Image (cartoon, rainbow, N blue to C red):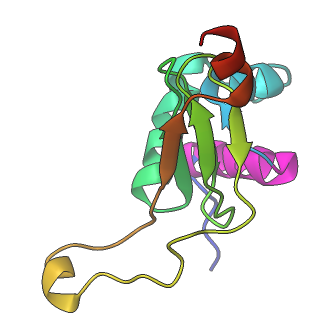
Amino acid sequence: MTTKPTASRQRQQRLLDALRSCGDEMSGQQLHRLLENGSSAMGLATVYRNLRQLQQQGLVRCRHLPTGEALYAPIEQDRHHLTCVDCGRTKALDHCPIHGLSISTEEQSEFKMLFHTLEFFGICAECQHNHP
């Protein structure tokens, strides 16, 4: 006997598929615009609610820009960034600088690890030049 996926699971799968096919991070607003047309369109609140559920399941990671905007990506995209706190420009790092690090068993007890984020904040060269 096969069970039909619930509407919530279908919405989550659509969001996950959109993020995976994009190959980059997307905001909830961008995902909403991408998926707002068609017979199974989602409202903006539904997009954010389902993104939060995907994050809680460990399938999606979220990072926040200095502007407050949240960007989402599938967990398998292990990308980290340098972010300018002045203009908000970000540069993806070629590798994960902490990939080999681990948390001790004692520190993780009673805690299920889902994903990690690592962000570096500073002032980009252009902003340094424009605001000495």
Asked which quadrant contains residue 88, the reply is top right
Q: Residue 108: x and y, percent?
A: 21, 79
Q: Is residue 112 above or below residue 93?
A: below
Q: Is residue 20 magenta?
A: yes
The C terminus sits in image quarter: top right
Residue at x 86% of width, y 51% of height: 21
Residue at x 16% of width, y 79% of height: 107
Q: Does 51 sit left or right of 20 as displayed?
A: left
The N terminus sits in image quarter: bottom right
Judge by depth and name the residue closer to the eye, 68 or 32.
68
Asked which quadrant contains residue 75, the reply is bottom right
Q: Is residue 65 above or below residue 16?
A: above
Judge by depth and name the residue closer to the eye, 29 or 3.
29
Q: Residue 105: x and y, percent?
A: 21, 90
Please identify the residue farthest to the bottom as the structure is shown: 105
Residues drawn in magenta: 7-23
Q: Residue 123: x and y, percent?
A: 58, 28
Q: Residue 12: x and y, percent?
A: 61, 47
How many marks on residues? 0
